Image: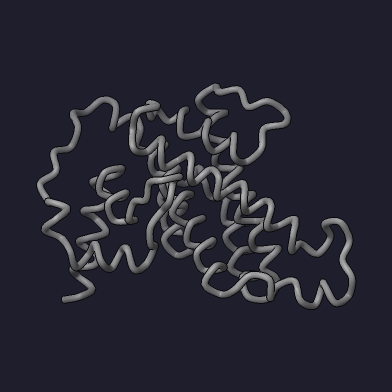
Amino acid sequence: MERLKKVIEQYGRWSELTTYTERIEAHASTDFSHAIENAKALLETIGKEICNAKGVELGETANVNAVMKKAFTAIGYSSDTLVTQISAALATIGQQMGNLRNEIGTISHGKSLEELKERNNKVDELTKEFLIDTTVIVASFLIRSFENENSRVKTEPVEAELLYTDNEPFNDFWDDLYGEFAMGDYSFPASEILFNVDYLAYVTESKIFSDDVE
């Protein structure tokens, strides 16, 4: 969550999102249903803000899946980019967060006393960590992509000076941290996604990793 908090701090217009990040951190261990509800709301808020800024109509009944897909499109990614393929999978994760919230929430459909007691046990710690980490990755990427869009459009593409295949220690570290993202029959490691989607961010994170190792 610290990574996302730094991004929010960097771009002041998103400061209100701290309401969500604080709630997620406060309830991640004690009431995960509340944490996941705020994680879903955080992604949805970012998506709606981007769409509103770009003049993209969402409709009154747009779910988080539709909001996130339109947000990626609003930023300017064409249908044939790797980012668009990845965004479809990430949007699905956002929708599943809503389904999970309904399943383990304290007020959805009514709960027996035993169900209230056991609701947090329905999600293991590894899954909790994955969902929170995914929220951080997606939210940070959307904000940074939106904020950097003008410079990305107006400048020439950045030529990769650092080869992905020559940076295995960092790639292994990043993949161990965030794993792989599956999209139907396709699967991409997190480090490869970062390298191809946001090369400058890849370089920055790689440098931070190298400095920490040293």
Q: Position of residue 198 (x, y in %)?
A: 29, 44
Q: Quadrant of the C terminus?
A: bottom left
Q: Position of residue 93 (x, y in %)?
A: 55, 50
**In the drawing, does residue 113 fall left or right of residue 78?**
right
Q: Hey, which quadrant is residue 208 in on the image?
A: bottom left
At x 45% / y 40%, what residue is drawn? 87
Viewer-proximal residue, 46 or 36?
Answer: 36
At x 52% / y 34%, what residue is drawn? 69
Q: How is the image coloured?
A: one colour
**Residue at the front extreme, as displayed:** 185
Q: Hey, which quadrant is residue 104 in on the image?
A: bottom right
At x 38% / y 30%, what residue is drawn? 77
Q: Position of residue 34 (x, y in %)?
A: 70, 63
**In the drawing, does residue 190 fall left or right of residue 59?**
left
Viewer-proximal residue, 202 or 204?
Answer: 202
**In the drawing, does residue 134 fall left or right of residue 113?**
left
**In the drawing, does residue 99 fall left or right of residue 147?**
right
* Up-down relation of residue 18 to residue 70 (above or below): below
At x 70% / y 57%, what residue is drawn? 101
